[in-house]
């Protein structure tokens, strides 16, 4: 456990020492703030199709849904250096010979990345929460939506860490991670074709469908389990990948 804490602490410090991390924070918060103001204006001056919808549905849910896309775009830039940089600089050899296990190494780096993404999520979450000062909001739906966004970015991070174990080029890691995340994001489009079994499979594989359920306040165990499966699967794959590389050295 101490090894995981030490690795996680080192990773989150490394991320915050990076200029790219602060650029990402600035861009994410700027985009979120602009979108929040646009959605707030729509709520205050509702179009006919928004009539009868509350602040939670129009502003909070809308912001969280768009934030999912923003995190899809920025997460690859956070995870790309987790192991690619270690391999490029040669420090991966030192990690292999250190007393920490590969499980501690992967989980520690993953938790460090999650810590940074949680900081981003916290600032984004303050915007819809601030609505409670001027109007009534559905705290249960908001809480469900925030949980959904957290699980979404946690699964994004797990995929990104795994891809980072495959290459020493950070740019390649970022591009491949984005490609995988984007494919998963739009995979639900394939659900409209083929047989009923085909539709069920692709609907379940889409993180967007599970995310939308949580944003709508539908807190289902199947949606939570879906994200946990992705997190555990790709974290395990990362450990196996590093173990295979260490054996071949």
Image: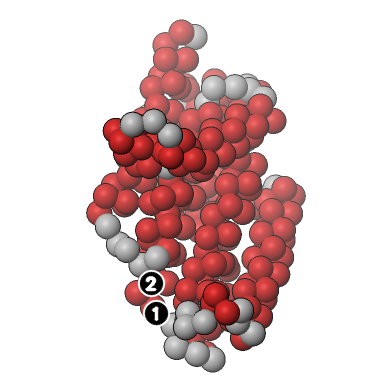
Indicate left or right for 134 with 226 as reference: right
Q: Residue furthest bottom?
A: 134
User: Is residue 207 in sight in this rendering?
Assistant: yes
**x%, y% of residue 247?**
42, 11
Where, by quadrant of the figure, is residue 241 drawn?
Answer: top left
Q: Nearer the viewer, residue 115 or 98?
A: 115
Which residue in the structure is indicated by mark 2? 141
Indicate left or right for 227 with 129 as reference: left
Marks 1/2: CA distance?
A: 5 Å
What residue is rendered at 52% in x and 64% in y?
64
Q: Nearer the viewer, residue 136 or 241?
A: 136
Q: Residue furthest left?
A: 221
Q: Residue furthest top?
A: 248
**x%, y% of residue 51?**
52, 82
Which residue in the structure is indicated by mark 1? 138
What residue is rendered at 46% in x and 8% in y?
248
Question: Label 1 neighbourhood size at 10 Å, few (<14), some (14-19), many (20+)?
Answer: some
């Amino acid at each position: 456990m101490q090894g995981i804490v030490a690795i996680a602490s080192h990773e989150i410090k490394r991320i915050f020492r990076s200029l790219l991390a602060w650029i990402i924070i600035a861009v994410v918060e700027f985009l979120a703030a602009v979108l929040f103001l646009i959605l707030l204006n729509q709520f205050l001056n509702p179009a006919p199709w928004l009539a009868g919808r509350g602040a939670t549905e129009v502003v909070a849910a809308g912001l969280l849904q768009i934030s999912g896309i923003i995190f899809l775009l920025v997460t690859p830039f956070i995870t790309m250096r987790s192991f690619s940089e270690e391999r490029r600089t040669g420090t991966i050899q030192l990690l292999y010979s250190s007393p920490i296990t590969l499980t501690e190494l992967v989980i520690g780096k993953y938790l460090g990345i999650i810590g940074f993404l949680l900081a981003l999520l916290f600032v984004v979450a303050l915007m819809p929460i601030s609505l409670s000062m001027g109007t009534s909001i559905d705290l249960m739906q908001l809480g469900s939506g925030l949980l959904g966004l957290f699980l979404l970015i946690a699964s994004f991070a797990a995929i990104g860490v795994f891809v980072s174990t495959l290459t020493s080029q950070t740019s390649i890691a970022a591009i491949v991670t984005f490609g995988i995340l984007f494919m998963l994001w739009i995979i639900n489009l394939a659900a409209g074709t083929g047989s009923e079994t085909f539709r069920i499979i692709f609907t379940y594989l889409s993180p967007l469908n599970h995310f939308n359920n949580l944003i709508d306040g539908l807190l289902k165990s199947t949606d939570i389990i879906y994200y946990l499966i992705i997190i555990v699967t790709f974290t395990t794959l990362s450990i196996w990948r590093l173990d295979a590389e260490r054996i071949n050295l």
